[in-house]
Structures are given as C-alpha cells and as structure tokens.
Amino acid sequence: MMPLTKSDLGYRWVTRIVAILGVVVTAWAAFATGPMLIHGHPAYIILLGVTLVVSLAVAARSWLPRAPRNPVRRGRRVVQAVLLVASSLVIAAVAWLVPQSAQAPALGAMKSDSSVTVTEDATEIVMAPTGVESPVGVFFQPGARVDARAYSAILRPLAESGHLVVITKQPLGIAFLATGAFASARAAHLPVIRWIVGGHSLGGLVAATDAETFAGAARDQVVGLLFFASYPASNISQVKVSVLSISGSNDGLSTPEKVAAAKPTLPASTRYLVVKGGVHAFFGDYGPQAGDGTPTISHNQARAKIAAGSVAFVNGLGG
C-alpha cells in the first residue's frame, strides 16, 4: 500500500469544495425560490433534494479517514474528473434554474370568486368561469423559468369572458420539457372542444408546435394561436389557424426586429398588436428581466392592453 499522492490529495480537496458548493448553492436556491417550491412543478424541488442529499453524502465521505491504497489508475482518474465536471454542471444548473416568482397582482388573481374558480395542482393552473362556459378554451405555456402563476392576472379576463384557461407548469420551468402537456390536457377539460394555444417567449415556440400538430385534429382541435412576445421556431405559414401576435415596442428580448423577421413564417392572415412602450416582462407579473428594454408605459396599462387584445381575439373564435 502507498501513501496518498499529491494528486490524490488534490482530488480529495476538489471533491470537498464541489460538495460543499453543492450544499450552499442548493440551500440558496431553495431560499431564493421561496413559495414556488410548493407552487411550481415538482421536478425542481426533486432536483434540489437529490442534489442536496448527494452533496451532503459526498462532503461527509470526503472527510472520513482512509487507509493508504495503491496508486489510482489513469482510467479511474478520468472517471473521477468526469464526475467532478458533471457534478459542477448540475450545481450550475440548480443555480441557473431558480425561477422568477409571481408578484402582485398575479397572486391576487389566483383567488376564486363569484365569476371565476381557480384550482391548482402540481402540473397546471385552471381558471374556470362559474357561469356558462364557452366551447373554446385557452392553453398557455409560460416563459422560461417563470412562475406559472405570474400569468394569472393577464389571463384571468379570458376566464371572466367565459373561457376555460389552463396554464401549464413546466418541469424545471422550461417549455421544451412540457411539449406533451397540451396533448394530455386537451381532452381532459369539457365542455371545451376547440382550443387556442398560446405562450410567452419560449413558451410561444412550443405553442406554435402544438398548433401545427393539432390544427387539423378530428376532435379537440386547435383553432387559434396566441403569441405573447414570441414567434415560431419553424415555418407555420400554411397551418390553418388564426394567429394573434402581441409584442412590446420596447422589448429587449423578443425585439420588434425579431418579431418582424418572423412574419414570413406565419400565416398571411396573422394579426399584430404592438403595445407601445411595453417590454418583455410586462407579459406577466414576475418582476424585471435581465436584458429587457426600458418601458415607457406603466405595467398596469400594458397588462390591460394585452388582456383586452387577447379577449377580443379569443371571443372572435367562437364566443
């Protein structure tokens, strides 16, 4: 048996540092996420829990005394290096995936009253009108790493107008991980028989894919597509759906130039509503967003314009 080499000691200390960093980052992420740990999709809290447990176990094991052993072979050293890199990437992902939580007035809009019943479970938020319900419903995909509740105030007027509204909760807050959400929900909510799919930012890309897939469906088909500061990732100009694109003139992320460049990929009948002075973060209630533009209109004014445009569009597709 050989004593520990400098390489062994170096690996042990790097392991300790990465494990401790995992504990610290996970604890910070849980604190920063706050109430959304129980209001978001369970995938994130599971990721936090697994990362915390593994980090604690590795940290504890790295401090246990070990008997000297034979030199580590090169192949094993490569495996150790790969594990350290993979662990570091997971810890970085935990930090990056911290969501932007819903703020007022979205949180207030989550309450049921005489006109709208709001229910919430692990994978979706449902706003149902208490009166006569339209056969046309709305399924909405949030933007990346944004609390699904953040869209409740801007979408609630649709429910108040008689339309069922479903806001999906995406695993880890990423729309591309919720590509099957609409397929699962479309037949589960009666008396809706026709759907408008919509989304904010990255969520709009997934909504466009759903529109392309289900526009010609024999039942529970998609008849409309609603973009909030978004546009499709592919050419859907031949898809037979009504489209409304709502954007902000001061959006620093889905800029006016990007929205204009995407027009050839949309049906010729697409309607466009530009909220003058609006920015990317005004399409929900979750606070400022990095890289966004500077608004020249109040958030309340922008929200009212976006909601009114959405209601007019959905009402026009089936009352």
Image: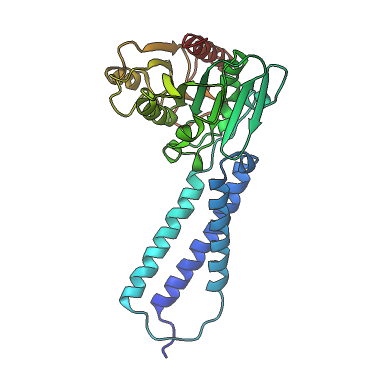
Relative depth, front residue between 300 and 161: 161
The answer to whether one can see residue 228 in this image is no
Seen from the viewer's position, the closer of residues 205 and 183 is: 183
**Residue 83 spot, x, y in % from top left:** 41, 64
Q: Quadrant of residue 3?
A: bottom left
Residue 73 visible in the current orientation: yes
Percent coordinates x, y for residue 68 in the rendering: 46, 86
In the current view of this chain or complex, which residue is farthest to the right?
114
The N terminus lies in quadrant: bottom left
272 to the left or right of 309? left
Task: Examine the image and state in which quarter residue 53 appears.
Answer: bottom right
Q: Identify the residue at image location x=39%, y=26%.
A: 214
Residue at image x 38%, y 25%?
Answer: 217
> Residue drawn 32% across and 20% down?
239
* Total marks placed: 0
- Residue nearest the observer in this picture, 5 or 191: 191
Q: Quadrant of residue 208?
A: top left
Query: Residue lying farthest front?
Result: 218
* Residue 35 as seen in the image, left or right of residue 8: right
Q: On screen, 108 above or below 271?
A: below
Left of 74 or right of it: where is 227? right
Query: Residue 182 location, x and y as percent?
Result: 47, 32
Where is residue 122 shown, x and y percent of the image? 60, 40
Q: How is the image coloured?
A: rainbow
